[in-house]
Structures are given as structure tokens and as C-alpha cells.
């Protein structure tokens, strides 16, 4: 997965949990991700 795919996935989960538009508010375009050894998002870094 690329960084864009991780960002898209994080935004989709946030929209599901908190409502439409929350993903763009919580995760701007310049965030980076720390992944687990299995490739899942472990931490979101600003």
C-alpha cells in the first residue's frame, strides 16, 4: 500500500466512526503513518 492508500483508508474509517467529513478534518494531506510489521496503520504522525 502507498501513503495515499493509507491516508484514504484512515479517512474512510474516521468518516464511518465520526460522520461524513471527519476524515478530512482529522487527517490533512501531510500526515505520515507508522505501520506494524503486518502493514496495518499503527500510528498517525503529524
Image: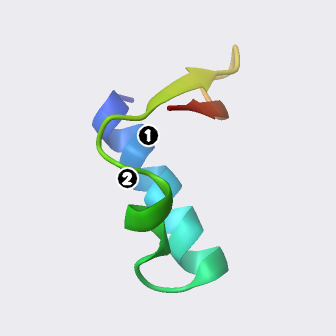
In the image, is 44 to the left or to the right of 27? right
Quadrant for residue 39, please give it: top right
Count neighbours of disc 1 (C-alpha within 10 A) and say few if under 14, some if 14 to 19, many if 20 or more.
some
**Number of marks drawn:** 2
Query: Which residue shows up at 62% across the image and 22% down it?
Result: 35
Q: Where is residue 21? Give x, y as percent.
A: 40, 78
Give the SS element for disc 1.
helix
- Residue 8 — which label? 2
Quadrant for residue 43, please give it: top right
In the image, is 11 to the left or to the right of 40? left
Q: Where is residue 34? Give x, y as percent.
A: 60, 21
Count neighbours of disc 2 (C-alpha within 10 A) and say few if under 14, some if 14 to 19, many if 20 or more.
some
Quarter of the image for the N terminus: give it.
top left
Query: Which residue shows up at 54% across the image and 85% down it?
Result: 19
Query: Which residue shows up at 40% across the image and 45% down it?
Result: 7
Q: Where is residue 11? Give x, y as percent.
A: 45, 60
In the image, is 33 to the left or to the right of 31? right
Q: Are marks 1 and 2 in contact (CB under 8 Å)?
A: yes
What colour scheme has been applied to the protein in the rendered image?
rainbow
Quadrant for residue 45, please give it: top right
Q: What residue is shown with label 1?
A: 6
Amino acid at each position: 500500500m502507498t501513503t495515499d492508500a493509507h491516508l484514504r483508508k484512515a479517512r474512510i474509517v474516521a468518516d464511518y466512526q465520526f460522520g461524513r467529513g471527519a476524515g478530512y478534518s482529522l487527517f490533512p494531506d501531510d500526515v505520515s503513518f507508522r505501520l506494524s510489521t503486518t502493514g496495518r496503520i499503527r500510528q498517525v504522525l503529524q
